[in-house]
């Protein structure tokens, strides 16, 4: 669906903050755009055995939703820290879940496949069809707000950032584009700072849909050429942004979905018209309750 672009109700903010509400998609996340686009572009013979993806949850739901629509079997490889809310949603949509240690899951992302499982592998990040589907978010933003000063995008693997940034580079190159990571898992920030792809020590948090241990090799040159920079926010700042979104705009955002808002509220993108991509809203009820009570999960 075409999601709305609304103003954040926070006059005390250091900028005019706008929210692109991808949490309102049927699966609660932007991932539906890329999954549908990639699968619709695939040759029928490549889909005969079904589809496979590796995801912490949101891409899994996108692929499972699209597979159900197309009448295809779907298998999802998930890391062992994936939240139960997302796992339950995958199974509700008809997907088969294979839970593996984080290292094995990351290997599936790097290799674009998982041994022993048949089907077309729909990569959650570096599939060109996925990135193109994600890019429609940028086109919609520019139709609704033609001259934003900056756009802030939660960064996980780079597929969302690359898609949206490509649209802005083509349609409005004057807009600054920033990727935002949690400080507990910020390989893009480390890579940009050092000028080369770096691995970092990954620390899991309730921000499960963003960050990682490294920038994927195929994504590094693309992302580096498209963004103006990368930002980090703390887990506490992210938790506060989730709470503010719920209290001021009645918007439910997951941790990754609130990263962009946390960075904008901290003034890290400067002043002017700032568009924050609220990438998803699939957060465990218990974690949301903790945040609304004023604590960080």
Image (cartoon, rainbow, N blue to C red):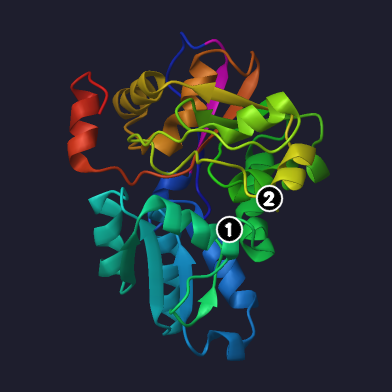
For image coordinates 58% across by 42% down, the residue present is: 214
Query: How many numbered badges does the structure rendering display?
Result: 2
* Label 1 packing within 10 angstroms: few (<14), some (14-19), many (20+): some
Residue 297: x percent and y percent? 25, 29
Quarter of image, res 254 = top left
In-image side of 150 versus 279 (left or right): right
Q: CA distance from mark 1 to mark 2?
A: 8 Å
Residue 115: x percent and y percent? 47, 75
Quarter of image, res 36 = bottom right
Contact between marks 1 and 2 (CB within 8 A): the answer is yes
Between disc 1 and disc 2, whose residue precedes? 1
Residue nearest the viewer, comparing 120 with 164: 120
Tell me which segment is drawn in magenta.
Answer: 14-21
Up-down relation of residue 55 to residue 9 (above or below): below
Numbered circle sitting on residue 217:
2
The chief SS type of the magenta part is strand
Numbered circle sitting on residue 51:
none
Residue nearest the viewer, comparing 111 with 178: 111
Residue 119 visible within the image: yes
Quarter of image, res 90 = bottom left
Secondary structure category for the residue under label 2? loop
Residue 139 visible within the image: no
In-image side of 258 versus 263 (left or right): left
For mark 1, what is the residue?
110
Q: Is residue 160 magenta?
A: no
């Amino acid at each position: 669906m075409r999601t709305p672009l609304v103003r954040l109700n926070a006059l005390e903010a250091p900028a005019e903050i706008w929210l692109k509400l991808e949490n309102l998609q049927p699966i609660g996340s932007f991932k539906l755009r890329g999954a549908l686009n990639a699968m619709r572009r695939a040759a029928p013979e490549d889909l005969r055995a079904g589809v496979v993806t590796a995801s912490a949850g949101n891409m899994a739901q996108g692929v499972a939703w699209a597979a159900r629509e197309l009448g295809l079997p779907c298998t999802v490889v998930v890391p062992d820290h994936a939240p139960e809310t997302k796992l339950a949603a995958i199974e509700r949509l008809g997907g088969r879940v294979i839970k593996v240690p984080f290292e094995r899951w990351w290997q599936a992302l790097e290799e674009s496949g998982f041994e022993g499982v048949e089907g077309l592998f729909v990569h959650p990040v570096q599939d060109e069809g996925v990135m193109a589907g994600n890019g429609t978010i940028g086109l919609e933003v520019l139709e609704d707000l033609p001259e934003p000063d900056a756009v802030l995008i939660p960064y996980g693997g780079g597929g969302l950032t690359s898609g949206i940034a490509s649209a802005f580079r083509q349609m409005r190159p004057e807009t600054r584009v920033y990727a935002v990571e949690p400080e507990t898992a910020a390989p893009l920030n480390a890579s940009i700072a050092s000028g080369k792809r770096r691995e970092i020590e990954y620390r899991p948090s309730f921000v499960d849909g963003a960050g990682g241990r490294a920038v994927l090799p195929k994504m590094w040159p693309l992302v580096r050429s498209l963004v103006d920079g990368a930002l980090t926010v703390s887990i506490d700042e992210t938790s506060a942004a989730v709470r503010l979104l719920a209290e001021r705009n009645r918007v439910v955002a997951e941790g990754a979905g609130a990263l962009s808002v946390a960075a904008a509220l901290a003034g890290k993108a400067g002043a002017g018209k700032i568009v924050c991509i609220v990438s998803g809203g699939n957060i465990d009820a218990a974690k949301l309750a903790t945040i609304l009570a004023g604590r960080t999960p």
